[in-house]
Image (cartoon, helix red, strand yellow):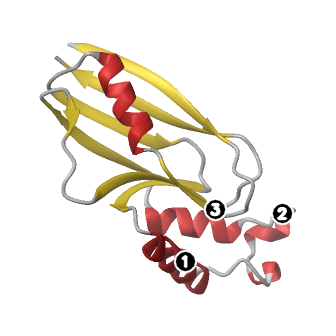
Amino acid sequence: MKSLTEHLWFETPHRRDYLNITHTVEALVRKSGIREGLCLVNAMHITASVYINDAEDGLLHDYDEWLEKLAPHEPTSQYQHNRTGEDNADAHMKRQLMGREVVVAITNGKLDLGPWEQIFYGEFDGRRRKRVLVKIIGE
């Protein structure tokens, strides 16, 4: 069995951002030379997410609005976690809702994504450097 491990680094300019990383992950699958296997894409920070959905701007806006309603950033005093000097309790909750990682099958050397499926990095406490792990295994 072969494997490839790579780290993607992000530093978004906003507190919340949604980045389509599908093409980057596809390039890593090609680099790996793996024809049949699995690709794990994992946010390595507890205030960021990796998820799969449609790359449609209206949907990205809707996600952002929905997450902010469920776990609003302000007032920051509403969260006990923020009493530690942090102001990112909402980001932890948003990550929990959107998920930590995705696993995508590799078939014939390509990500086996469904129609409209794209891989996204979701950032909920941005403006600092964060890492995503990509681990590809197979033959």
The nearer-to-camera label among 1 and 2 is 1
Q: CA distance from mark 1 to mark 3?
A: 10 Å
Please state if 87 lies on the left or on the right of 101 as rendered.
right
Residue occupying the point 61% across, 80% down: 68
Q: Quadrant of residue 40?
A: top left
Q: Pointer 1 and pointer 3: residues touching (CB < 8 Å)?
A: yes
Q: Earlier in the sequence, mark 1 or mark 2?
A: 1
Q: Quadrant of residue 27?
A: top left
In the rendering, which numbered label is found on residue 67? Answer: 1
In the rendering, which numbered label is found on residue 84? Answer: 2
Give percent across and percent down for residue 132.
53, 38
Q: Amino acid at mark 1?
A: Leu
Residue occupying the point 75% across, 75% down: 80
Residue occupying the point 42% across, 32% down: 134
Q: Badge 3 local density, few (<14 within 10 Å), some, or many (20+)?
A: many
Give percent across and percent down for residue 31.
35, 18
Q: Pointer 1 and pointer 2: residues touching (CB < 8 Å)?
A: no
Q: Badge 1 local density, few (<14 within 10 Å), some, or many (20+)?
A: some
Please, what secondary structure does the residue beneath circle 1 have? helix
Please, what secondary structure does the residue beneath circle 2 have? helix
- Give the quarter of the figure containing the C terminus: top left
- Please give the residue where the numbered disc 3 appears in the rendered image: 124
Please, what secondary structure does the residue beneath circle 3 have? loop
- Give the quarter of the figure containing the N terminus: top left
